[in-house]
Amino acid sequence: MMRTFWKIGITCLMLIVCALVAVPASAEEMSVLSEQQASLWQGQTSQVYEVTLNCPGTATVVSSYGARFDLYAKKKWGYGSCPSPNSILYNYDKVAYGYSGTATMTLEAGTWCLVVYGFSGSGSYSLRVTSNCPYPTPYPTPYPTPCGVYKSDTRTGFLNQGQAAVYGYYIPTDGRSKIEWSMTSSGGGSTPIIVASAGQSVESSSYGGSTFDLYVFKDCNPQNSYCNTRYYSYGPNAYVSVAPPSSGSTYYVMVYARSGSGTYNLKMNSYKCGGTTPIIVASAGMDATMSTASAASDDTGSGSEVSAPSAEIVISE
């Protein structure tokens, strides 16, 4: 009899212990949707993380000591894949700056595309997504291993109002999966600022009221012809991408000083990715919202065409 009571007592005790252990684990599963870890250095972007929330939640990035890693988010509508990291940096819906080593933002219910950007310093980071949903939500799904920049080029110069610079970029017969240009400008001063090209970068803002615009023409040099294009972006910060560009074609890029005068920094990146491999861009120094024609995908071509502005072309390469 006594042995039977002992067995019953031990069984009850084990059930109580299991219940106490199981409750916190269940609560944890409901609140923490994902915790991703990786490393970045200054000017680099992470891969794109896609996460679906059934109810509002929070995304937090904690970076290594002395580093500032920012978090950018773009809400995805409908089907299809997330935009490239560079597109998200230029056309984000939300941004959180990691001034004290932590960047936190709230996310509404829906599917979000997240990118971590190394603004300064280097080291590891953790990306943690939480929610108050009473039921589990899918974990963020990293994209397949992406390909990076294949070729890069930087051009700088100084323009007065009404002047323009034109640069030609030839696409070899072996093809490219994407080519992109980012242009920043700053007013004031008379000495051009030359910036070293270390991957793709897109940071600057306009000073003194100067506004520089960016136009890209396929097989049409605006210096010699009347050209139209649907690839354009109005400054002071501008971004245009063509995906994929036509092999054997030359793309003429026009930097136009619409108002004011100052320096500009034009950066080109080309990519050579196979199949459906996503493109990931190593950006540097971005801390401002960009104004672009369109950024629904890797190709920013607009549905309507515009003509090349009438300008005094003072630089042509």
Image (cartoon, rainbow, N blue to C red):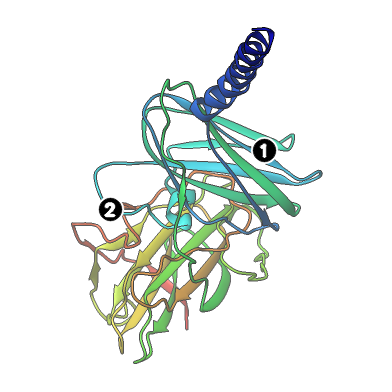
Residue 167: x and y, percent?
44, 78
Residue reaching furthest front?
1
Q: Nearer the viewer, residue 268 or 313?
A: 268
Res 272 → quadrant: bottom left
Position of 91 compared to 47: left or right? left
Res 144 → quadrant: bottom left
Res 92 → quadrant: top left
Identified at 58% across, 60% down, the residue is: 283
Identified at 65% across, 61% down, the residue is: 190
Question: Which numbered disc, 2 or 1, marks the residue that appears first in the sequence?
Answer: 2
Position of 289 compared to 60: left or right? left
Q: Nearer the viewer, residue 134 or 45?
A: 134
Q: Is residue 97 above or below residue 246?
A: above
Position of 241 compared to 155: left or right? left
Name the image quarter holding the N terminus.
Answer: top right
- The kind of residue on which mark 2 rests is Gly
Q: Which residue is labeled 1 in the image?
A: 98
Q: Is residue 183 visible?
A: yes
Residue 304: x and y, percent?
18, 57
Query: Tags 2 and 1 in contact by the CB under 8 Å rule?
Result: no
Q: Is residue 236 visible?
A: no
Q: Which residue is labeled 2 in the image?
A: 80
Report helix, strand or loop for mark 1: loop
Residue 186: x and y, percent?
58, 53
